[in-house]
Amino acid sequence: MRLLYFAWVKEKTGIGAEDIDIPASVTTVAELMAWLKTRGPEFEHAFARSEVIRAAIDQSHVRHDAHLAGAREIAFFPPVTGG
Amino acid sequence: MIRVQQEDFDIGVEIAALKAGRTDIGAVVAFLGTVRDQDGAIAALTLEHYPGMTERELGRIEAEAQARWTLQASLIVHRVGTLRPSDNIVLVLTASAHREAAFAAAEFLMDYLKTRAPFWKRESGPDGSRWVEANAKDDAAGGRWRTSKDAAE
């Protein structure tokens, strides 16, 4: 699965994109964020305030209870500030 | 039509292109967003985005506006990269037969873009740089266009 990070989420994790195998027990966006937090201090820091982080599956906004089944690309980012 | 680009744009050229060869347009509304300095605190604004999703999301927002109002044409141009105070950031054009649809659709496009299009601003100035925080007022402005169908999603 391809994971993407943007803005301060990217800054804190230290990477913009990675291809990774996630455990079968991780089935939702919220579970994925909880699992990512266990990957080291950078990820723990990046996802510490996971409630404010927004997610997209295959380039569509999703809620934290969205299921990951069939997802190819999952992105994590702060609330958007364009315009 | 939507475009994401580093280069500046010319509002007059864009309006002329939107109207070119058409005689059914009675109203064009333009919104131009520019970089605002805050008493010398902002030297530069850098816009990051999510290539691919940005274009999809802007296209979706534009399609939603076209579904809600009768528009003859519309355009969203958003810049990315590093900008300076007074530089152009975003242009929204809407064209319709009468002004009501163009005014409403332009406001809708900006409100939705502000809350849904994946862009992030980083400000830098004499005191260092920081990510701009999302504005609750923008969320409220985006929320007022929501339908009961959106709320269920």
Image (cartoon, rainbow, N blue to C red):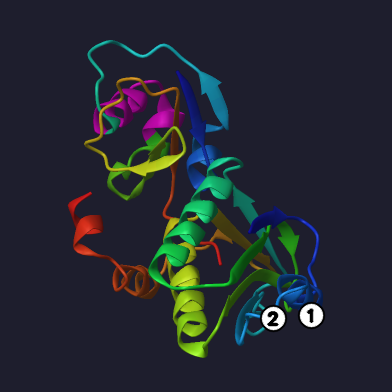
The x, y position of residue A33, in whole percent, is 32, 31
**Residue at x 43%, y 50% (from the top left corner):** A78
Q: Secondary structure at mark 1?
A: helix
Q: Is residue B129 visible?
A: no
Q: Earlier in the sequence, mark 1 or mark 2?
A: 1
Region in magenta: A30-44
The x, y position of residue B43, in whole percent, is 73, 71
Amino acid type at mark 1: Gly
The x, y position of residue B38, in whole percent, is 61, 81
In which chain is the residue bearing label 2? B
Amino acid type at mark 2: Thr
The answer to whether B150 is drawn above or below residue B96 in the figure is above
**Residue at x 47%, y 65% (from the top left corner):** B66
In which chain is the residue bearing label 1? B
Q: Is residue B49 visible?
A: yes
Give the side of residue B136 with respect to residue B66, left or right: left
**Residue topped by disc 1:** B12
The answer to whether B77 is drawn above or below residue B28 in the figure is above
Q: Tell me which secondary structure the magenta stretch mostly adopts.
A: helix
The x, y position of residue A74, in whole percent, is 43, 30
Q: Secondary structure at mark 2?
A: loop
Q: Are marks 1 and 2 in contact (CB under 8 Å)?
A: no
**Residue at x 41%, y 23% (from the top left corner):** A40
Q: Nearer the viewer, residue A25 or A10?
A: A25
Give the side of residue B5 with respect to residue A71, left or right: right
**Residue topped by disc 2:** B23
Give the side of residue B106 with respect to residue B83, left or right: left
